[in-house]
Image (cartoon, rainbow, N blue to C red):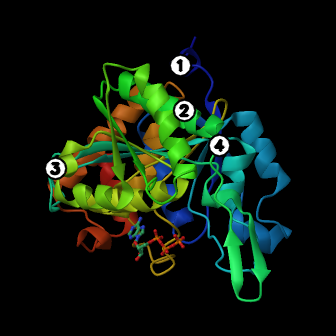
């Protein structure tokens, strides 16, 4: 039997290049994953703007069928159109279709990246399926619009359980639920009540609560004191960008959207239209998302190699894209990373 056959067949996975800088950073991730020994058989599926222009739909049926089949995907950022016109958010649709209820964003300081803080190591756990992302909006009277925030006990309990399980698995010590229950007494009150119930079943993990505005201030004063952050959808969206800023910005933070059966991995950043197509985007967030995918499908060694190479690259301080104050091209960072594997 050849060595290749012994290692087993490549794991099928869906690849969504995305819009803006998506194709550039996803191409980098795919190259690095293969060079690290990752064994993935990619099924490339367009979505978003590219699919809308070519096929008249931003969410083609072939894309959904592919994810149903592979159950795992690596996704570039997709453009979400602002205002009334255009198609509805593909990101939101994918999360709802596959019930990807947990959005996980590990936020870690990288030695070699100069920021206001060192030693940050926290995880943002964001509920991904409801809240103001319900998509329920209507005009009640001319000049008056209502957007509906939906919070359910089922989803709140599920994400709280997820956060505590993650804390236990990763040997973390503290979960802090972030809320605005002083104003949204019913909705955020329900979210907190569910978190409290789940916390009771985890006596070894410290549980705390912070109002979102205070949490933002504490995060930019003492980020090292945070461990696992548990948030509803909208607060999670905003606070995770803030957290990305603590460790060097959006170009460095990977993410995962996880459900019971499916998982889609993607960087926290968006399409960055200002630098799209210029070979300037930082590919590391997409590369690290690829490493998370490899770990998820059991290819831990390849994932570890990628994470070590990223650390080395950042410590070298030589190959840096514009977001980190350098001038290196996406392709140059990718090549160096592969050399460091
Ligand atoms: P979208 O609407 O898709 O979220 P956006 O431009 O509003 O796009 P981001 O794409 O998250 O939001 O980008 C915010 C800023 O961060 C932009 O100035 C962008 O150039 C920069 N940025 C984001 N990702 C990267 C990256 N991977 N490399 C370099 N700069 C980045």
Q: Quadrant of ligand 1?
A: bottom left
Residue nearest the viewer, comparing 52 with 181? 181
The mark lying in front, picked from 3 and 1, is 3
Q: Is residue 73 left or right of residue 141?
A: left
Mark linked to residue 178? none
Quarter in which the N terminus is drawn: top right
Q: Are marks 2 and 1 in contact (CB under 8 Å)?
A: yes
Q: CA distance from mark 3 to mark 4?
A: 40 Å
Q: Which residue is tagged 2?
A: 39
Residue located 58% across and 48% down the image: 128
Q: Residue at x 64, y 35 (%)?
A: 154
| Marking on residue 7 | 1
Label 2 CB, ligand 1: below 8 Å? no
Residue hosting label 3? 111
**Residue 340 visible in the displayed image:** no
Q: Position of residue 161 (x, y in %)?
A: 50, 29
Q: Secondary structure at mark 3?
A: loop
- Of residues 298 and 248, the one nearer the viewer is 248
Marked residue nearer the N-terminal end (2 or 3): 2
Of the two numbered discs 3 and 4 on the same chain, state the one appearing first in sequence.
3
Query: Residue 13 sits in which quadrant?
Result: top right
Quick one: label 2 or label 1, which is nearer the N terminus?
1
Q: Secondary structure at mark 2?
A: loop
Observer-side mark, 2 or 3, equals: 3
- For marks 4 and 2, the one nearer the N-term is 2
Q: Are marks 2 and 3 in contact (CB under 8 Å)?
A: no
Reading the image, the residue beneath label 4 is: 152
| Quadrant placement of the C terminus | top left
Tell me if residue 48 comes above or below residue 219 in the rendering.
below
- Give the quadrant of residue 65: top right
* Neighbour tally class for label 4: few under 14, some 14-19, many 20 plus, Cα within 10 Å: some
Q: Earlier in the sequence, mark 4 or mark 1?
A: 1
């Amino acid at each position: 039997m050849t060595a290749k056959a012994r290692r087993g067949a490549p794991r099928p996975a869906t690849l969504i290049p995305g819009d803006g800088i998506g194709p550039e950073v996803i191409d980098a991730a795919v190259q690095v994953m293969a060079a690290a020994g990752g064994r993935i058989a990619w099924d490339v599926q367009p979505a978003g703007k590219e699919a809308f222009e070519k096929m008249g739909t931003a969410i083609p049926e072939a894309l959904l069928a592919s994810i149903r089949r592979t159950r795992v995907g690596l996704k570039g950022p997709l453009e979400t159109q602002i205002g009334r016109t255009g198609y509805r958010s593909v990101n939101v649709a994918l999360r709802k279709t596959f019930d990807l209820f947990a959005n996980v964003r590990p936020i870690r300081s990288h030695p070699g990246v100069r920021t206001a803080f060192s030693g940050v190591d926290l995880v943002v756990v964001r509920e991904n399926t409801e809240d103001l992302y319900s998509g329920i909006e209507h005009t009640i009277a001319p000049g008056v619009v209502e957007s509906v925030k939906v919070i359910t006990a089922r989803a709140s309990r599920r994400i709280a359980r997820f956060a505590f399980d993650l804390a236990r698995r990763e040997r973390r010590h503290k979960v802090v639920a972030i809320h605005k229950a002083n104003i949204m007494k019913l909705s955020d009150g329900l979210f907190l009540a569910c978190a409290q119930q789940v916390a009771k079943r985890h006596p070894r993990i410290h549980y705390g609560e912070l109002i979102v505005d205070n949490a933002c201030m504490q995060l930019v004063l003492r980020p090292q004191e945070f461990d696992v952050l548990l948030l509803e959808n909208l607060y999670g969206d905003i606070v995770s960008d803030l957290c990305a800023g603590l460790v060097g910005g959006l170009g460095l933070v990977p993410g995962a959207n996880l459900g019971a059966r499916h998982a889609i991995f993607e960087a926290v950043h968006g399409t960055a239209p200002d630098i799209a197509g210029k070979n300037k985007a930082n590919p590391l967030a997409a590369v690290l998302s690829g490493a998370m995918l490899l770990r998820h499908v059991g290819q831990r060694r390849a994932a570890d190699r990628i994470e070590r190479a990223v650390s080395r690259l950042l410590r070298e301080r030589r190959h840096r894209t514009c977001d980190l104050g350098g001038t290196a091209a996406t392709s140059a960072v990718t090549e160096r990373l592969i050399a460091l594997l």
